[in-house]
Amino acid sequence: MQLTRDHFFFLGVLLILLGVEFRMVESFVLNEKASQFVLKRFGNKLQQSAAAARQDLPLPILREKRPTRYTWTPPEWLGWSLISIGSVLVLHSLAMPKPSG
């Protein structure tokens, strides 16, 4: 499949919008199912931080019943990078020749 002008434009706009979203949102809180998936895949480092968060509760009963929710804070550079790459793709699509037909 050959990438056309429309594909580059669409991908650029998508990356720009995703970058703006990452710049506007401080953090994402995953639900229990997604949190368990992330904790299984990315190892002990995340499990230790989640366990430390559970230990802040005063009652031992609440510690065991509280579901683990992982909070992800995207780095500041990620949003700017996506906006930059998306802008380059949009400009590239505008510089490409129009499709004949």
Image (cartoon, rainbow, N blue to C red):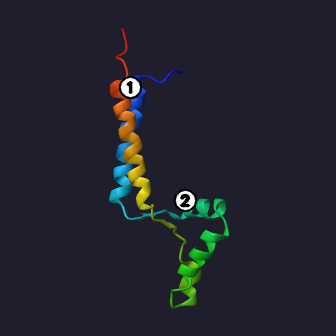
Report whether 66 appears left or right of 16.
Answer: right
Q: Residue furthest bottom?
A: 58
Residue drawn at 60 percent across, 78 percent down: 51
- The foreground one among 16 and 47 is 16
Badge 1: few (under 14), some or many (20 or more) residues near its Cα, within 10 Å?
some
Q: Is residue 89 above or below residue 40?
A: above
Q: The residue tagged with tag 2: helix, strand or loop? A: helix
Q: Nearer the viewer, mark 2 or mark 1?
A: 1
Report whether 31 appears left or right of 97.
Answer: right
- The foreground one among 85 and 55 is 85
Q: Which residue is mark 2?
A: 34
Q: The residue tagged with tag 1: helix, strand or loop? A: helix
- The circle on residue 6 is 1
Residue drawn at 38 percent across, 33 percent down: 10
Looking at the figure, which quarter contains the C terminus?
Answer: top left
Can you give x and y, in whole percent of width and height, for residue 98 in the image? 34, 17
Looking at the figure, which quarter contains the N terminus?
Answer: top right
Can you give x and y, in whole percent of width and height, for residue 84 in the image? 38, 45
